[in-house]
Amino acid sequence: MAKSREMTTVAGKVKKVTFNAIGIIDGSTEKTSNGRTRPKLFWLPKSQISVEPEDYDIDSDVTIELPAWLAVQEGLE
């Protein structure tokens, strides 16, 4: 089955950047193995997304357009 071309938009804060991906937080949390709660980091491939503003840096607030299937796969929707 082909993946849908439907797009969606999410907002978040940049926490990590690599050559191929951007790591953002969106306010979601997760439990660690010791029972503490921490912000959940979502890794998104740069080849699949569009980021505004384009000149983002660590701790920048951004808006990201991405395929809806990717947002669902990563737990952003």
Image: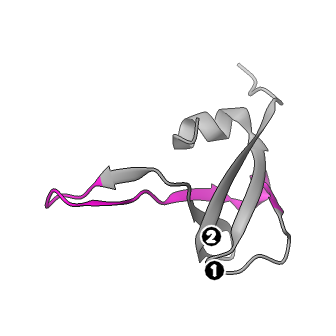
Q: Is residue 46 magenta?
A: yes
Q: Which residue is mark 2?
A: 14
Q: Position of residue 35 (x, y in %)?
A: 16, 56
Q: CA distance from mark 2 to mark 1?
A: 5 Å
The residue at 13%/61% (across/down) is: 34
Where is 66 relative to 55, above or below? above
Residue 22 numbered tag:
none
In contact (CB < 8 Å): disc 2 and disc 1: yes
Q: How crowded is the residue under tag 1: few (<14 C-alpha within 10 Å), some, or many (20+)?
A: few
Image quadrant in which the C terminus is located: top right
Quadrant (top left, top right, bottom left, bottom right) of the N terminus: top right
Query: Residue 14 placed where, x, y %?
Result: 62, 70
Q: Is residue 16 left or right of residue 29?
A: right
The stretch in magenta equals 31-51
Residue 69 on the magenta segment: no
Residue 60 image offset from top left, x and y in percent? 68, 74
Q: Residue 58 appears in which quarter of the rendering?
A: bottom right
Q: Is residue 64 left or right of residue 28?
A: right
Q: Which residue is mark 1?
A: 58
Q: Name which residue lies at 69% across and 67% down.
A: 61
